[in-house]
Image (spheres, rainbow, N blue to C red):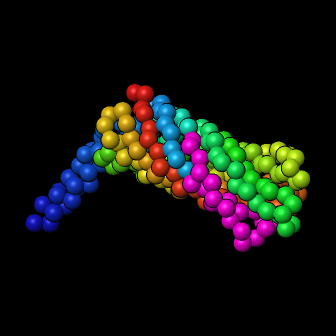
Amino acid sequence: MTSIRTLAAGLAITTLPGMALADSSQWQGAYLGFQATQTQFEVSVIPGVTNDATSIDVYGGYNYAVNPNWVVGAEIVVATGDSVPYDLSGGGQPYGFAGMSSLNIRGGYAVNNFLIYAGAGISQSEIILSPGGTSNYSIEDAYNLFVGGEMMVNEDLSVRMQYTHSEGEPFVFGPSSSSTAQQISIGATYHLN
């Protein structure tokens, strides 16, 4: 009886990974997509004040199936966002950001038509500071950490949802300032297999 249980357990262990042989291969290859992103943004020099912005992002990347379940990849995201207005010093300097580009690496685990992934990246945002109606532009460097899930709808199309946390240094306020952003994105991806 013990040998039958041992044999059954051994078969279950070796069969389960084999059942998912095609899982990661459907994610391999180049892809293009777009997503709607909602961002909540805060700068350290005005604590407790957060503002929201919405953007439509375009992205592209490449996934590589490492084994039957694991996928790794790289992705470029370009976003066009609306300005996030701040009112500094009682009305003198509206502040905002518009446009964010990022370069990300990610890894994911594929099960059936689903891919659960996480990753990290770097980004650059355009910072707009407008004292007295004159716009000054600066570039903010930030790092991103993200988690998400993606579902294959058919062999060419998938949909995804992602949460991203970003931390940066908007030097337009001086070297000791910092910013944080929380983002939720929902998108659709076309796979160029």
Residue in view at x 74 percent, y 53 percent: 96
Q: Could you say where residue 2 lies in the image, as x and y percent from the top left?
A: 14, 66
Residue 140 shown left or right of residue 131 in the figure: left
Q: Is residue 91 above or below residue 130?
A: below
Q: Is residue 125 above or below residue 157?
A: below
Residue 192 shown left or right of residue 140 in the figure: left
The answer to if 39 sits in the magenta stretch is: yes
Residue in view at x 48 percent, y 30 percent: 30
Residue 50 shown left or right of residue 38 in the figure: right
Numbered disc total: 0
User: In the rendered image, which quarter contains the N terminus?
Assistant: bottom left
Residue in view at x 17 percent, y 58 percent: 8
The answer to if 20 sits in the magenta stretch is: no
Please report the bounds of the magenta region as a residue range.
38-57
The answer to whether residue 67 shows anywhere in this view is no
> Residue lying farthest top?
193
Residue in view at x 70 percent, y 50 percent: 83
Q: Could you say where residue 191 lies in the image, as x and y percent from the top left?
A: 42, 32
Q: Name the quadrant containing residue 113.
A: top left
Query: Which of 10/46 is in front?
Result: 46
> Residue lying farthest bottom?
48
Q: Could you say where residue 77 lies in the image, as x and y percent from the top left?
A: 59, 40
Q: Could you say where residue 62 lies in the image, as x and y percent from the top left?
A: 51, 34
Residue 151 shown left or right of residue 167 in the figure: left
Q: Is residue 47 above or below residue 180?
A: below
User: In the rendered image, which quarter contains the C terminus?
Assistant: top left
The answer to whether residue 58 shows anywhere in this view is yes
Query: Which of 98/5 is in front?
Result: 98
Query: Which of 108/122 is in front?
Result: 122
Q: Which secondary structure class fits the magenta region best?
A: strand
